[in-house]
Protein backbone atom coordinates (compact mmCIF):
# COMPACT_ATOMS: atom_id res chain seq x y z
CA UNK A 1 0.00 0.00 0.00
CA UNK A 2 2.82 2.40 0.86
CA UNK A 3 4.64 1.63 -2.38
CA UNK A 4 1.49 2.35 -4.42
CA UNK A 5 1.09 5.68 -2.64
CA UNK A 6 4.66 6.65 -3.36
CA UNK A 7 4.34 5.78 -7.04
CA UNK A 8 1.15 7.84 -7.20
CA UNK A 9 2.83 10.81 -5.55
CA UNK A 10 5.75 10.62 -7.97
CA UNK A 11 3.38 10.39 -10.94
CA UNK A 12 1.35 13.34 -9.71
CA UNK A 13 4.49 15.42 -9.39
CA UNK A 14 5.67 14.51 -12.85
CA UNK A 15 2.28 15.33 -14.39
CA UNK A 16 1.49 18.48 -12.39
CA UNK A 17 3.99 20.75 -10.72
CA UNK A 18 7.04 22.10 -12.52
CA UNK A 19 9.63 21.08 -9.96
CA UNK A 20 13.28 21.98 -9.68
CA UNK A 21 15.15 19.18 -7.89
CA UNK A 22 18.38 20.02 -6.09
CA UNK A 23 20.75 17.51 -4.50
CA UNK A 24 22.17 17.61 -1.01
CA UNK A 25 24.71 19.06 -0.47
CA UNK A 26 23.88 22.18 -2.46
CA UNK A 27 24.84 25.78 -1.83
CA UNK A 28 21.13 26.65 -1.65
CA UNK A 29 20.77 24.76 1.63
CA UNK A 30 22.27 25.52 5.03
CA UNK A 31 22.89 22.42 7.17
CA UNK A 32 23.00 23.04 10.92
CA UNK A 33 23.65 20.76 13.87
CA UNK A 34 26.20 18.55 12.12
CA UNK A 35 29.52 20.29 12.85
CA UNK A 36 31.61 17.94 10.70
CA UNK A 37 29.25 18.08 7.71
CA UNK A 38 31.83 19.62 5.36
CA UNK A 39 34.65 17.41 6.63
CA UNK A 40 32.41 14.38 6.11
CA UNK A 41 31.73 15.45 2.50
CA UNK A 42 28.02 15.93 3.03
CA UNK A 43 27.26 12.75 4.98
CA UNK A 44 24.41 13.33 7.46
CA UNK A 45 26.21 11.94 10.51
CA UNK A 46 27.11 13.43 13.89
CA UNK A 47 30.80 12.56 14.34
CA UNK A 48 33.78 13.06 12.02
CA UNK A 49 34.84 10.14 9.87
CA UNK A 50 38.26 10.37 11.52
CA UNK A 51 36.74 9.04 14.78
CA UNK A 52 35.27 5.85 13.32
CA UNK A 53 38.05 3.69 14.78
CA UNK A 54 38.56 5.86 17.87
CA UNK A 55 35.17 5.80 19.61
CA UNK A 56 33.43 2.61 20.73
CA UNK A 57 31.47 0.82 17.94
CA UNK A 58 28.03 1.51 19.53
CA UNK A 59 28.82 5.23 19.70
CA UNK A 60 29.89 5.26 16.06
CA UNK A 61 26.75 3.37 15.03
CA UNK A 62 24.50 5.81 16.90
CA UNK A 63 26.32 8.76 15.35
CA UNK A 64 24.98 7.71 11.95
CA UNK A 65 21.54 8.93 13.04
CA UNK A 66 21.52 12.72 12.45
CA UNK A 67 19.62 13.78 15.57
CA UNK A 68 19.69 17.56 15.81
CA UNK A 69 20.59 17.99 12.16
CA UNK A 70 18.56 20.60 10.27
CA UNK A 71 18.35 21.70 6.64
CA UNK A 72 17.37 25.37 6.35
CA UNK A 73 16.58 27.86 3.60
CA UNK A 74 14.12 30.60 2.74
CA UNK A 75 11.83 30.35 -0.28
CA UNK A 76 8.63 31.59 -1.84
CA UNK A 77 8.00 28.21 -3.45
CA UNK A 78 4.39 27.05 -3.76
CA UNK A 79 5.53 23.40 -3.63
CA UNK A 80 8.08 21.48 -1.59
CA UNK A 81 9.03 17.84 -2.09
CA UNK A 82 11.78 15.58 -0.77
CA UNK A 83 13.47 12.28 -1.65
CA UNK A 84 14.62 10.10 1.26
CA UNK A 85 16.35 6.75 1.64
CA UNK A 86 16.53 4.71 4.85
CA UNK A 87 18.57 1.57 5.64
CA UNK A 88 15.65 -0.15 7.41
CA UNK A 89 12.09 0.47 8.63
CA UNK A 90 11.10 1.82 12.05
CA UNK A 91 11.69 -0.86 14.68
CA UNK A 92 11.57 0.67 18.17
CA UNK A 93 9.04 -0.46 20.77
CA UNK A 94 9.03 2.69 22.90
CA UNK A 95 9.28 5.33 20.19
CA UNK A 96 6.90 6.40 17.42
CA UNK A 97 8.02 5.81 13.83
CA UNK A 98 7.82 9.57 13.25
CA UNK A 99 10.31 10.22 16.05
CA UNK A 100 12.66 7.49 14.95
CA UNK A 101 12.68 8.09 11.18
CA UNK A 102 10.76 11.30 10.57
CA UNK A 103 11.88 14.41 8.74
CA UNK A 104 9.86 17.29 10.22
CA UNK A 105 8.89 20.31 8.16
CA UNK A 106 8.60 23.64 9.99
CA UNK A 107 7.50 26.84 8.22
CA UNK A 108 8.55 30.05 9.98
CA UNK A 109 9.05 28.02 13.15
CA UNK A 110 5.64 26.35 13.03
CA UNK A 111 5.18 22.61 12.52
CA UNK A 112 3.63 21.56 9.21
CA UNK A 113 4.09 17.82 8.54
CA UNK A 114 6.46 14.84 8.71
CA UNK A 115 7.89 12.55 6.04
CA UNK A 116 8.58 9.09 7.45
CA UNK A 117 10.09 5.74 6.46
CA UNK A 118 7.67 3.00 5.48
CA UNK A 119 7.50 -0.56 6.72
CA UNK A 120 9.24 -1.62 3.50
CA UNK A 121 12.25 0.70 3.89
CA UNK A 122 15.45 -0.87 2.61
CA UNK A 123 18.74 0.34 1.09
CA UNK A 124 18.15 1.57 -2.45
CA UNK A 125 14.46 2.35 -1.96
CA UNK A 126 13.82 6.07 -2.32
CA UNK A 127 10.69 7.69 -0.91
CA UNK A 128 9.45 10.78 -2.71
CA UNK A 129 6.96 12.90 -0.80
CA UNK A 130 5.25 16.23 -1.35
CA UNK A 131 5.54 18.20 1.89
CA UNK A 132 3.21 20.94 0.70
CA UNK A 133 1.54 21.96 -2.57
CA UNK A 134 0.01 25.44 -2.73
CA UNK A 135 -0.06 25.66 -6.52
CA UNK A 136 -2.36 28.46 -7.60
CA UNK A 137 -1.95 30.52 -4.44
CA UNK A 138 0.01 33.72 -4.05
CA UNK A 139 3.70 33.30 -3.34
CA UNK A 140 4.78 33.84 0.26
CA UNK A 141 8.38 33.81 1.50
CA UNK A 142 8.91 31.42 4.40
CA UNK A 143 11.81 30.12 6.44
CA UNK A 144 11.85 26.38 5.80
CA UNK A 145 13.45 24.05 8.35
CA UNK A 146 13.70 20.27 7.94
CA UNK A 147 14.56 18.45 11.18
CA UNK A 148 16.35 15.15 10.50
CA UNK A 149 15.59 11.79 12.18
CA UNK A 150 16.44 11.18 15.83
CA UNK A 151 17.15 7.45 15.68
CA UNK A 152 17.66 6.29 12.09
CA UNK A 153 20.25 7.11 9.42
CA UNK A 154 18.87 8.85 6.35
CA UNK A 155 20.05 9.98 2.95
CA UNK A 156 18.43 13.06 1.45
CA UNK A 157 18.69 12.53 -2.29
CA UNK A 158 16.98 15.74 -3.26
CA UNK A 159 14.77 18.66 -2.28
CA UNK A 160 12.44 20.24 -4.83
CA UNK A 161 10.81 23.65 -5.15
CA UNK A 162 8.69 24.90 -8.01
CA UNK A 163 10.49 26.07 -11.13
CA UNK A 164 9.92 29.77 -10.51
CA UNK A 165 10.76 29.82 -6.81
CA UNK A 166 13.39 32.02 -5.23
CA UNK A 167 15.78 30.53 -2.67
CA UNK A 168 17.74 32.51 -0.09
CA UNK A 169 19.43 32.01 3.27
CA UNK A 170 17.17 31.45 6.25
CA UNK A 171 17.04 34.18 8.87
CA UNK A 172 20.16 34.02 11.07
CA UNK A 173 20.20 32.58 14.55
CA UNK A 174 20.56 34.88 17.54
CA UNK A 175 24.17 33.69 17.94
CA UNK A 176 26.69 32.56 15.35
CA UNK A 177 27.88 29.64 17.50
CA UNK A 178 25.74 26.64 18.51
CA UNK A 179 24.96 25.27 21.95
CA UNK A 180 26.41 21.74 22.19
CA UNK A 181 24.57 19.06 24.17
CA UNK A 182 26.34 15.86 25.22
CA UNK A 183 24.52 13.00 26.89
CA UNK A 184 22.36 9.91 26.74
CA UNK A 185 19.29 8.64 24.90
CA UNK A 186 17.32 11.43 26.57
CA UNK A 187 19.68 13.91 24.94
CA UNK A 188 19.47 12.08 21.60
CA UNK A 189 15.71 12.55 21.64
CA UNK A 190 14.19 9.41 23.11
CA UNK A 191 11.23 9.33 23.16
CA UNK A 192 9.99 12.42 21.30
CA UNK A 193 7.10 11.80 18.92
CA UNK A 194 9.04 13.50 16.11
CA UNK A 195 12.40 15.28 15.61
CA UNK A 196 11.09 18.78 16.23
CA UNK A 197 10.06 17.77 19.76
CA UNK A 198 13.43 16.94 21.32
CA UNK A 199 14.13 19.41 24.10
CA UNK A 200 17.03 20.94 22.17
CA UNK A 201 14.81 21.51 19.13
CA UNK A 202 12.18 23.17 21.32
CA UNK A 203 14.84 25.35 22.95
CA UNK A 204 16.23 26.23 19.55
CA UNK A 205 12.87 27.61 18.47
CA UNK A 206 12.19 29.34 21.78
CA UNK A 207 15.53 31.18 21.80
CA UNK A 208 16.38 31.19 18.07
CA UNK A 209 19.53 29.16 18.75
CA UNK A 210 21.59 26.76 16.70
CA UNK A 211 22.44 23.52 18.53
CA UNK A 212 24.41 20.28 18.21
CA UNK A 213 23.02 17.03 19.62
CA UNK A 214 25.70 14.58 20.78
CA UNK A 215 23.42 12.29 22.74
CA UNK A 216 24.14 8.57 22.37
CA UNK A 217 21.46 6.13 23.45
CA UNK A 218 22.77 3.86 26.20
CA UNK A 219 26.29 5.08 25.47
CA UNK A 220 26.57 8.60 26.84
CA UNK A 221 29.17 7.47 29.36
CA UNK A 222 31.51 10.44 29.40
CA UNK A 223 34.57 8.72 27.96
CA UNK A 224 37.58 10.92 27.29
CA UNK A 225 37.38 10.44 23.51
CA UNK A 226 33.96 12.06 23.52
CA UNK A 227 35.13 14.89 25.76
CA UNK A 228 37.80 15.70 23.20
CA UNK A 229 35.29 15.52 20.35
CA UNK A 230 32.90 17.85 22.16
CA UNK A 231 35.69 20.31 22.91
CA UNK A 232 36.63 20.56 19.22
CA UNK A 233 33.35 22.35 18.51
CA UNK A 234 33.57 26.11 19.00
CA UNK A 235 30.31 26.58 20.89
CA UNK A 236 28.39 29.36 22.59
CA UNK A 237 27.85 26.98 25.53
CA UNK A 238 28.10 23.31 26.44
CA UNK A 239 25.38 21.34 28.20
CA UNK A 240 26.40 18.08 29.90
CA UNK A 241 23.31 15.93 30.28
CA UNK A 242 24.72 12.53 31.19
CA UNK A 243 25.01 10.21 34.14
CA UNK A 244 22.29 7.57 33.69
CA UNK A 245 24.30 5.52 31.16
CA UNK A 246 26.93 4.93 33.83
CA UNK A 247 25.32 1.98 35.56
CA UNK A 248 26.93 2.65 38.92
CA UNK A 249 28.14 5.59 40.94
CA UNK A 250 31.68 4.22 40.73
CA UNK A 251 31.52 4.28 36.93
CA UNK A 252 30.37 7.91 36.92
CA UNK A 253 33.07 8.92 39.41
CA UNK A 254 35.74 7.66 37.02
CA UNK A 255 34.64 9.86 34.13
CA UNK A 256 32.86 13.00 35.30
CA UNK A 257 35.82 15.07 36.49
CA UNK A 258 38.12 13.96 33.63
CA UNK A 259 35.43 14.93 31.10
CA UNK A 260 35.16 18.43 32.55
CA UNK A 261 38.93 18.78 32.71
CA UNK A 262 39.33 17.75 29.07
CA UNK A 263 36.66 20.23 28.03
CA UNK A 264 38.28 23.03 30.02
CA UNK A 265 41.71 22.32 28.50
CA UNK A 266 40.31 23.41 25.14
CA UNK A 267 37.46 25.74 26.18
CA UNK A 268 38.61 27.42 29.37
CA UNK A 269 36.06 30.22 29.51
CA UNK A 270 33.04 28.83 27.66
CA UNK A 271 29.79 28.54 29.62
CA UNK A 272 29.12 24.97 30.75
CA UNK A 273 25.85 23.74 32.26
CA UNK A 274 25.96 20.44 34.14
CA UNK A 275 22.55 18.78 34.47
CA UNK A 276 21.89 16.10 37.08
CA UNK A 277 19.60 13.20 36.21
CA UNK A 278 15.93 13.90 35.62
CA UNK A 279 13.40 11.88 37.61
CA UNK A 280 12.88 8.22 36.71
CA UNK A 281 9.80 6.24 37.74
CA UNK A 282 11.89 3.52 39.41
CA UNK A 283 12.76 6.04 42.11
CA UNK A 284 9.15 5.80 43.24
CA UNK A 285 10.03 2.31 44.52
CA UNK A 286 12.99 3.54 46.54
CA UNK A 287 15.92 3.10 44.14
CA UNK A 288 18.61 5.60 45.15
CA UNK A 289 21.37 5.10 42.54
CA UNK A 290 20.34 8.18 40.55
CA UNK A 291 20.32 10.33 43.68
CA UNK A 292 23.87 9.20 44.48
CA UNK A 293 24.90 10.23 40.97
CA UNK A 294 23.21 13.60 41.38
CA UNK A 295 25.12 14.13 44.62
CA UNK A 296 28.43 13.34 42.89
CA UNK A 297 27.77 15.82 40.08
CA UNK A 298 26.84 18.49 42.64
CA UNK A 299 30.07 17.82 44.49
CA UNK A 300 32.25 17.99 41.38
CA UNK A 301 30.61 21.17 40.14
CA UNK A 302 30.72 22.94 43.52
CA UNK A 303 34.40 22.08 43.96
CA UNK A 304 35.28 23.44 40.53
CA UNK A 305 33.29 26.62 41.09
CA UNK A 306 35.01 27.12 44.44
CA UNK A 307 38.35 26.66 42.68
CA UNK A 308 37.55 29.50 40.28
CA UNK A 309 35.55 28.02 37.40
CA UNK A 310 33.06 30.88 37.22
CA UNK A 311 31.61 29.80 33.88
CA UNK A 312 30.29 26.48 35.20
CA UNK A 313 26.72 26.14 36.46
CA UNK A 314 24.57 23.35 37.86
CA UNK A 315 20.98 22.60 36.86
CA UNK A 316 19.05 20.02 38.84
CA UNK A 317 17.40 17.55 36.50
CA UNK A 318 14.52 17.12 38.91
CA UNK A 319 13.79 20.85 38.54
CA UNK A 320 13.29 20.17 34.83
CA UNK A 321 11.30 16.94 35.21
CA UNK A 322 10.71 15.84 38.78
CA UNK A 323 8.76 13.31 40.86
CA UNK A 324 5.46 15.15 40.38
CA UNK A 325 5.86 15.07 36.60
CA UNK A 326 5.73 11.35 35.88
CA UNK A 327 3.19 12.01 33.11
CA UNK A 328 6.12 13.43 31.17
CA UNK A 329 7.69 9.98 30.81
CA UNK A 330 7.07 7.27 28.19
CA UNK A 331 8.58 4.15 29.73
CA UNK A 332 9.54 5.38 33.18
CA UNK A 333 12.84 6.84 32.01
CA UNK A 334 12.52 8.70 28.71
CA UNK A 335 10.51 11.92 28.29
CA UNK A 336 7.55 12.17 25.98
CA UNK A 337 6.71 15.45 24.24
CA UNK A 338 5.27 16.89 27.45
CA UNK A 339 8.42 15.96 29.35
CA UNK A 340 10.66 17.50 26.73
CA UNK A 341 8.57 20.67 26.75
CA UNK A 342 9.04 20.89 30.51
CA UNK A 343 12.79 20.37 30.15
CA UNK A 344 13.06 23.06 27.49
CA UNK A 345 10.99 25.50 29.52
CA UNK A 346 13.18 24.87 32.55
CA UNK A 347 16.42 25.48 30.65
CA UNK A 348 15.30 28.43 28.55
CA UNK A 349 15.66 31.07 31.25
CA UNK A 350 19.09 29.83 32.30
CA UNK A 351 20.42 29.76 28.74
CA UNK A 352 18.91 33.14 27.96
CA UNK A 353 20.78 34.66 30.90
CA UNK A 354 24.07 32.85 30.33
CA UNK A 355 24.12 33.74 26.64
CA UNK A 356 22.86 37.29 27.26
CA UNK A 357 19.97 36.90 24.85
CA UNK A 358 17.27 39.53 24.65
Image (cartoon, grey):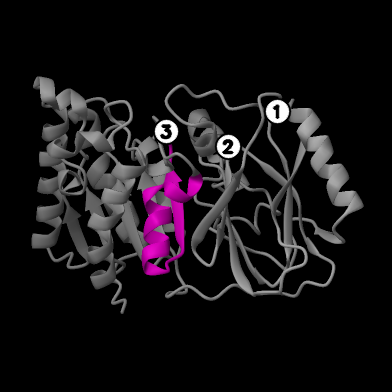
Of all residues, the one furthest to the front in this rendering is 136
Comparing 4 with 195, the one in front is: 4
Q: Where 168 falls versus 134 (above or below)? A: below
Residue 253, magenta (yes or no): no
Quadrant assignment for the C terminus: bottom left
Q: Which residue is mark 1?
A: 121
Disc 2 secondary structure class:
helix
Is label 2 or label 3 in front? 2
Q: Which residue is mark 3?
A: 217
Of the residues under marks 2 and 3, which one precedes in the sequence? 2
Q: Position of residue 221 (x, y in %)?
A: 34, 35
Q: Residue visible at 23% across and 46% down?
A: 257
Comparing 311 with 261, the one in front is: 311
Disc 3 secondary structure class:
loop
Of the residues under marks 2 and 1, which one precedes in the sequence? 2
Q: Where 164 falls versus 263 (above or below)? A: below
State which quadrant residue 146 falls in: bottom right
Q: Residue visible at 65% across and 74% down?
A: 140
Of the residues under marks 3 and 1, which one precedes in the sequence? 1
* Residue range of the region highlighted in magenta in the rendering: 195-216
Amino acid sequence: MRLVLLVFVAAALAAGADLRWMPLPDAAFEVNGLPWYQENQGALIRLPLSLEKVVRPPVWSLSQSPSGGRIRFRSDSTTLAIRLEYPSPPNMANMHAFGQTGVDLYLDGVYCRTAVAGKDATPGKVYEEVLFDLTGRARTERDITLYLPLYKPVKVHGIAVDGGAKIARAKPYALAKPVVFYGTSITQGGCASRPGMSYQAILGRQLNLDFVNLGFSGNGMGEIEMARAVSKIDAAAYVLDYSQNNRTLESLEKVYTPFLEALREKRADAPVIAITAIYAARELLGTDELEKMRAHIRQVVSRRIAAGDTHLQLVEGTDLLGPAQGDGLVDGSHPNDLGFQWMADGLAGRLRKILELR
